[in-house]
Amino acid sequence: MLNTFLKGEKGTRLRFIGMLLSAILVLLSVFTLTQKGLNFGLDFTGGYLTEFTTSQSVELKELQSFIAKNHNGEFELTAQGNSHFQLREAPSASTTSTAAANSLDWQSAVTQNDDINAQVLSSAYIGSQVGDELFDQGCLAMFAAMIAVMIYLAVRFEWRLAVGSVVALVHDLILVLGLFSLLQIEFNLTVLASLLAIIGYSLNDSIIVGDRVRELLRVQSNNVLSPATIINNAIKSTLTRTLITSGTTLATVASVWLLAGAPLQGFAIALFTGIVVGTFSSICIAATLPELLGLSAKNYEVKVDAHTQTLLDMP
């Protein structure tokens, strides 16, 4: 590997540097996940979810300070608009009758205050058992998607290219989860849905590059070009298409991130990050790892048995 890095083309060296950087980021993400964990939302932990509106525009910080004076537990207040708010109460503050009374206290305070004059639209309690079921079903869906992807890659590609695509896919998911753990962004059902979308997007990028690598290897049966050169040529021929596709998708996701509001913010952050690291991994992992595993044009040579060869050699 070191010899390939030192004597290889510039593109090869960049790919190896990118793969090394990816390995470091994965280790840091795993370390962050083990130390800080994920900040699970009410979808998974349970708790009270209350939506209310105010008669006039109120600053989020001012409203949060006012509610804190009438609320003894932990809560999270998010703005859905200028006068539409959503308050989430932690499960530790919503599992006893005292906590329920505490919830009514702050609701009475905001509805009776003349400056706020709030109106409660809905208030619901999500049990922890429901959250556990949602988490289990979400993990099962992700596991099923991964199994389907592995079966598809095993059928479509030579095993070295398949391994590279699977490793790139796992790399993308770990980095997204590591970012959410590092920043303690709420992990809810919409974020879980974005992870399933990232699986499909990352796989698409890896397949585009892998297909091109396979095509070039098949026409290089005389081994004139090295595998590293062939992979570099494959990346160059698909780079424009990849950047255009990723760029237009990122622009759409960025619009959702900036304009759709708090409910879809986690979804947009996860998908935006997944697209960026997915494009990166399709080049630095999905195309580079097979080279380290010994991928060459010989893997795509048509093997002919002795009897068939004799028939071919006959005049």
Image (cartoon, rainbow, N blue to C red):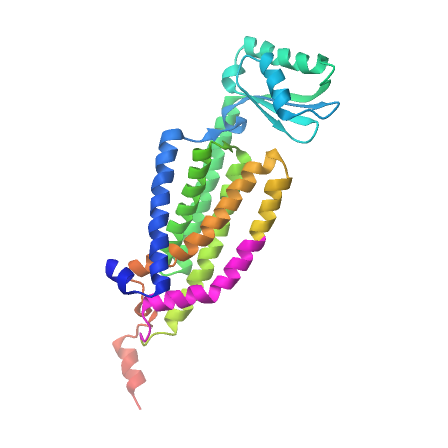
| Residue 96 on image: x %, y % | 53, 11
Q: Is residue 159 visible?
A: no
Quarter of the rendering occupied by the N terminus = bottom left
Q: Is residue 256 above or below residue 222?
A: above
| Residue 19 on image: x %, y % | 35, 52
Q: Is residue 77 above or below residue 282?
A: above
| Residue 130 on image: x %, y % | 52, 25
Residue 115 shown left or right of residue 161 in the figure: right
In magenta, the rendered stretch is 223-248
Would residue 224 be counted in the magenta stretch?
yes
Question: Between residues 238 and 198, which one lies in front from this camera angle?
Answer: 238
Q: Is residue 35 visible?
A: yes
Question: Between residues 34 and 255, which one lies in front from this camera angle?
Answer: 255
Quadrant assignment, res 152: bottom left
| Residue 289 on image: x %, y % | 33, 56
Quadrant assignment, res 178: top left
Name the residue rendered at 52%, 44% in the picture: 271
Would residue 152 be counted in the magenta stretch?
no
Name the residue rendered at 34%, 41% in the picture: 27
Question: Between residues 113 and 219, which one lies in front from this camera angle?
Answer: 113
Residue 184 shown left or right of residue 231 in the figure: right
Quarter of the rendering occupied by the C terminus = bottom left
Q: Is residue 280 above or below residue 308?
A: above
